[in-house]
């Protein structure tokens, strides 16, 4: 997997780059302009989003160990994991149906 990921939105595009030591997540304002009939991507300002310095997997594992030690309910439990899998399955089903929306109730 690459260290950088970009997802397109209407006018603001988040870009995550785990290889950057500090500025891991930035939001770019951009839009499409036309030069004649050719579309050209026009980028504007960039807003850096501060993220915790902790490594996410390490923090998640520490949270899990703390819950075992204290008996506290974890932030993300088995039910949460099942819901994430259902969302991913719905995304996959939508892709296979050429982008048709897929309801979570259709995923078993």
Image: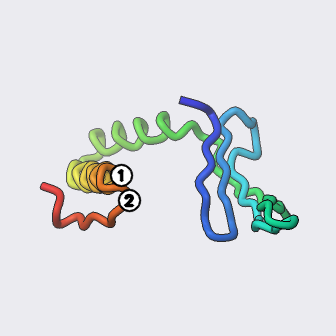
Which percent across, then down, holds residue 53?
A: 65, 42
Residue in front for this viewpoint, 76 or 16: 16
For residue 41, which numbered disc appears in the image? none
Which percent across, then down, holds residue 24?
A: 70, 45
Q: Determine which quarter of the picture holds residue 31.
A: bottom right
Give the labeled residue for mark 2.
Answer: 99
Residue in front for this viewpoint, 38 or 93: 38
Give the labeled residue for mark 1.
Answer: 95
Q: Residue at x 29, y 46 (%)?
A: 70
- Give the secondary structure at mark 1: helix
Q: Residue at x 23, y 64 (%)?
A: 104
Which percent across, then down, holds residue 100?
A: 33, 64
Disc 2 residue crowd, few under 14, some 14–19, many 20+, Cα 10 Å? few
Q: Residue at x 28, y 56 (%)?
A: 90
Residue in front for this viewpoint, 77 or 23: 23
How was this image coloured? rainbow
Residue reaching furthest left? 108
Which percent across, then down, holds residue 11?
A: 69, 70
Q: Is residue 12 left or right of residue 102?
A: right
- Give the secondary structure at mark 2: loop
Q: Which quadrant: the C terminus? A: bottom left
Q: Is residue 77 placed above or below 21 in the rendered structure?
A: below
Q: Is residue 35 left or right of residue 20?
A: right
Determine the CA span between mark 2 and mark 1.
5 Å
Q: Are marks 2 and 1 in contact (CB under 8 Å)?
A: yes
Q: Residue at x 27, y 40 (%)?
A: 68
Disc 1 residue crowd, few under 14, some 14–19, many 20+, Cα 10 Å? few
The answer to whether residue 94 is visible is yes
């Amino acid at each position: 997997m690459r260290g950088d990921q970009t997802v397109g939105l209407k006018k603001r595009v988040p870009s995550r780059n785990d290889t950057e030591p500090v500025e891991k997540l930035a939001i770019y304002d951009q839009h499409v302009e036309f030069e004649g009939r050719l579309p050209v991507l026009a980028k504007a300002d960039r807003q850096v989003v501060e993220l915790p310095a902790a490594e996410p997997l390490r923090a998640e594992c520490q949270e899990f160990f703390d819950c075992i030690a204290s008996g506290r309910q974890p932030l993300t439990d088995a039910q949460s994991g099942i819901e994430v899998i259902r969302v991913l399955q719905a995304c996959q089903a939508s892709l296979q149906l050429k982008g048709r929306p897929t309801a979570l109730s259709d995923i078993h």
